[in-house]
Amino acid sequence: MTELRAEIDAIDDALFDLFAERMTYIHRAAELKAEAGLPANIPSRVDEVVGNARRHASAHGLDPALYGAIWEKLVAAAIAEEERRLEA
């Protein structure tokens, strides 16, 4: 069980590395949106990203509703971060 938990922890660490990398792209998106005069929240893009998460989850045998909900929160946090940067 100890080895299994260590493997799960390693995957979690890798996920957070990817989330941190993803956030660097969110920051860049905020810069580009500021230059283009775009809002942080673009509903069609939100729908696309969440829909992609649901499809990817389903393709991997995971619960699309669960991962869609997780991605909705992830996207909401990204939008909030972009809004903070756009207001600055």
Image (cartoon, grey):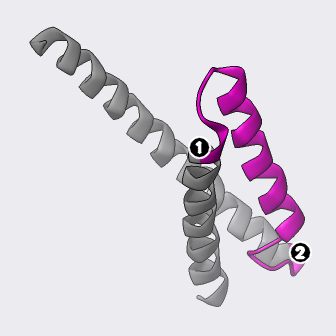
Residue sitting at 64 percent across and 81 percent down? Answer: 83
Tell me where residue 46 appears, x and y as whole percent.
Answer: 78, 61
Tell me where residue 53 appears, x and y as whole percent.
Answer: 69, 41
The residue wearing badge 2 is 36
Screen quadrant of the N terminus: top left
Residue sitting at 74 percent across and 75 percent down? Answer: 40
Residue sitting at 77 percent across and 41 percent down? Answer: 52
Magenta stretch: dominant secondary structure: helix
Secondary structure of the residue carrying tag 2 is helix
Secondary structure of the residue carrying tag 1 is helix
As drawn, the residue found furthest toward the bottom would be 87
Tell me where residue 9 appears, x and y as whole percent.
Answer: 25, 27
The disc label shown at residue 67, or none: 1
As drawn, 79 above or below 8: below
Q: Quadrant of residue 76?
A: bottom right
For the image shown, how many numbered marks are present on the structure?
2
**Spatial CA span between label 1 and label 2:** 31 Å
As drawn, 77 above or below 63: below
Observer-nearest of 42 and 50: 50
Observer-nearest of 30 and 73: 73
Q: Nearer the viewer, mark 1 or mark 2?
A: 1
Residue sitting at 29 percent across and 23 percent down? Answer: 8
Going by the image, does 7 lie left or right of 43?
Answer: left
Other residues around mark 2 within 10 Å, as few (<14) / some (14–19) / many (≥20) = few
Residue type at numbered disc 1: Tyr
- Over which residues does the magenta segment extend? 36-65
Q: Quadrant of residue 84?
A: bottom right
The mark that comes first in sequence, 1 or 2, is 2
